[in-house]
Image (tube, rainbow, N blue to C red):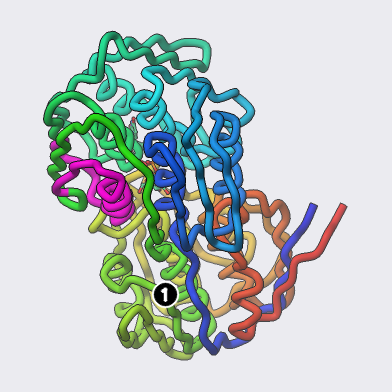
Amino acid sequence: MEQIVIEGKKRLEGEICVQGSKNSALPILAATVLCKGENIIYNCPKLTDVNAAIKILKYLGCKVKTQNNTVVVDSTNVDKYDIPENLMHEMRSSIVFLGPLLGRTGKAYLSTPGGCEIGLRPIDLHIKSIKKFGVDITEGYGKVKCDVKDKLNACEIVLSFPSVGATENIMLTACTAKGRTVIINSAREPEIEDLALFLNKCGAKIYGAGTGKITIDGVEKLLSAQHHVIPDRIMTSTYMASCAVTGGKIKLNNINYDHISPTLSAFLHSGCKIREYKNSIEIEAPERLKSIGTIRTMPYPGFPTDFQAPVMTMASVAKGTSVIIENIFESRFKHACELIRMGADIKVEGKISIVEGVKNLTGTTVTSTDLRGGTALIIAGLCAKGKTVMKDLTHVDRGCENFVENLRILGATIRREPYS
Ligand code: UD1
């Protein structure tokens, strides 16, 4: 096992490139099941979640090669339609294989993901929507069996909540369904647009991705394509938060400014200066942050729930009171307990957190309970007095590529080391 050790209070300065988006790469890799032939996916981050997706692809019969950040998936032969429980559980979002498997094989036998550290994570919206295409679904004992009755038939789906995963699964199922599918109240996240762009290169006819209404005209079949995954907007903001708490000044390359705009208010409100360049951003933080004001997490283009934990670390050391309201996941404040152990003044009441900024956090041994909570604690370690040790890196390794190395390039005193 490994742990991260941080000696805090080092001002971040310098320049790095931001990784490709995890939440874009995972559905695109799953989509290759539907896109028969050799697919080349560039800018794919090296993460344990990506490795888990590759294991599933290989199990299903695809040939997969990786070189640096390029993943080549040859999906000429897909001869299975089930995903074993151990592979499903390695990656939460493996439910996104449902749509591609139905389109390619007419069947998908999966296990249900179940709750996790941040909430119940139901898949009712996925199931209800997929049924409308004419799919027989039996659920029970942690398993879900889906069989296309005759053929996939297009339909109109009105989502009661713009779920990212459900929108992706519906889009993927609709690509080869007969007729025109319309998704009303679809998720508008940039990752949905990126998936649609890839699928359209493969011959799909998807219109309106990135808006609240997506139309998909079914085609006979999809062929393979090459695609460059978009930059990771959550990691971009996470590096900005790392800079902000240390009073630093950094430049981030390979970013998409539009995609991070929902988080900018927190940086500007707290006194950071931001300069936009083509595919780059520079952030300069004041010596001490001001309060971040009130943050409400919302579906895109609202403030992202995935950046709620890192922004709480910013609020913890900012001068004044900040309020954070988590509207997407029901148990997504677990990092608050660890921040409190480091000296933060946070009161949590249901979905609301009130953070009274303190001058200093103090390093201690902390444990992350989820990916973004883990990054929040690393950021806390960067500005804390003394030594912070973070155990259990499994969550952070799911989503952050070279996080420790990049922070070191920016001047942090941080290392990974084995422990037993
Ligand atoms: C995706 C992201 C995750 C991000 C989340 C919200 C990936 C791999 N993960 O997760 O990082 O935090 O979007 O931006 O892209 N819900 C239901 N029923 C369903 C599906 C969802 O009630 O069938 C609820 C969820 O419990 C949650 C909310 O809808 O409260 C949002 O979930 P959703 O948008 O589906 O998130 P994911 O796709 O799982």
> Residue 288, how many percent across, how many down?
46, 86
Q: Tell me the element at label 1.
A: loop
Residue 47, by quadrant, is bottom right
The answer to which of 10 and 200 lies nearer the viewer is: 200
Residue 140 visible in image:
yes
Q: In the image, what residue occupies the spot 27% across and 17% down? A: 131
> Residue 412, how many percent across, how many down?
64, 81
Q: In the drawing, does residue 95 fall left or right of residue 56?
A: left
Q: How many circles with numbers are drawn on the protein?
A: 1
Q: In the drawing, does residue 339 fall left or right of residue 326?
A: right
Residue at mark 1: 254
> Residue 171, how many percent across, how many down?
26, 36
| Image-quarter location of ligand 1 | top left
Residue 279, by quadrant, is bottom left
User: Which residues fall within the magenta stretch?
Assistant: 183-208
The answer to which of 182 and 362 lies nearer the viewer is: 182
Q: In the drawing, does residue 191 fall left or right of residue 213?
A: right
The extreme right residue here reads 420
Q: Magenta stretch containing residue 199, yes or no?
A: yes
Q: Magenta stretch containing residue 76, yes or no?
A: no
Few, some or many residues within 10 Å of mark 1 (<14, 14–19, 20+): some
Residue 330 visible in image:
no
Q: In the image, what residue occupies the spot 35% across and 84% down? A: 271
Above or below, 23 against 116 in this view is below
Q: In the image, what residue occupies the spot 63% across and 65% down? A: 342
> Residue 395, how many percent across, how many down?
61, 50
Q: In the image, what residue occupies the spot 29% across and 30% down? A: 173
Above or below, 283 against 348 in this view is below
At label 1, the amino acid type is: Asn
